[in-house]
Amino acid sequence: MVGKVIILAGTAGTGKSTVADVLLKNHSSKYPDVKFIEGDTLHPPSNVAKMSEGIPLEDEDRWGWLEKVANVSGDTARDRGMCIAACSSLKKKYRDFMREKRPDTDFYFVFLYGTKQEVLSRLERRSQHFMKANMMESQFKDLELPLEDEPHCCVVQIDGKGFQQVEKDVKEIVSKMFTDKQ
């Protein structure tokens, strides 16, 4: 069975983990064992240490982490039918890498996108996360939003929207992605 993984992607501070809760509830009737994986918990200690020091990650730092996210979410989706994961997936080559590592898995990348101003405002209200507001610039520098021809990808704008509107937008777009797939 090909597992489905919904990757909530985007820079820090866009609400990936919060939206994951909504998707878990939304898909639990069809996939009662659906599970959420917070990709940040899969970073090796060296990556967490760098980010905690305010040092942005380089591509070399990310490959092992991305492979682990792909494998853990892919295994979970294979066993449970579906998995929802939060993983920034900022560059197209990161998304392609995950797909290549797990050809037995259908990855759906849902980008939550906000402007720098919106994201900075959100990050400044967070205190318990290792990604600090001063690292936001590096994430926007790396950000490559998917183009229309990239398979199973979409962008949900979050600026100026309350959570209920973002929730509604995500549920609609994920439903459409699954309908278009079939």
Image (cartoon, rainbow, N blue to C red):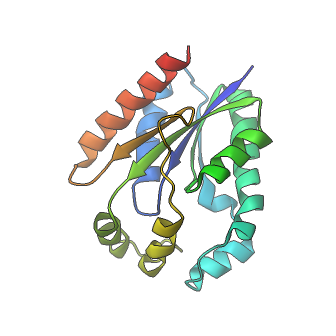
Q: Is residue 29 visible?
A: no
Residue 116: image x %, image y %?
Answer: 34, 67
Q: Quadrant of residue 13?
A: bottom left
Circle count: 0
Task: Say left or right for 173 vs 86.
Answer: left
Residue 46: image x %, image y %?
Answer: 73, 76
Which residue: 73% across, 73% down? Answer: 45
Which residue: 40% across, 54% down? Answer: 15
Task: Say left or right for 16 vs 47.
Answer: left
Using the image as rendered, state which of residue 91 and residue 88 is in the foreground.
Answer: 91
Using the image as rendered, state which of residue 134 and residue 22 is in the foreground.
Answer: 134
Residue 174: image x %, image y %?
Answer: 44, 30
Residue 110: image x %, image y %?
Answer: 48, 41
Q: Quadrant of residue 156?
A: top left
Using the image as rendered, state which of residue 157 and residue 161 is in the foreground.
Answer: 157
Q: Quadrant of residue 164?
A: top left
Relative to 106, residue 39 above or below: below
Which residue: 55% across, 32% down? Answer: 152
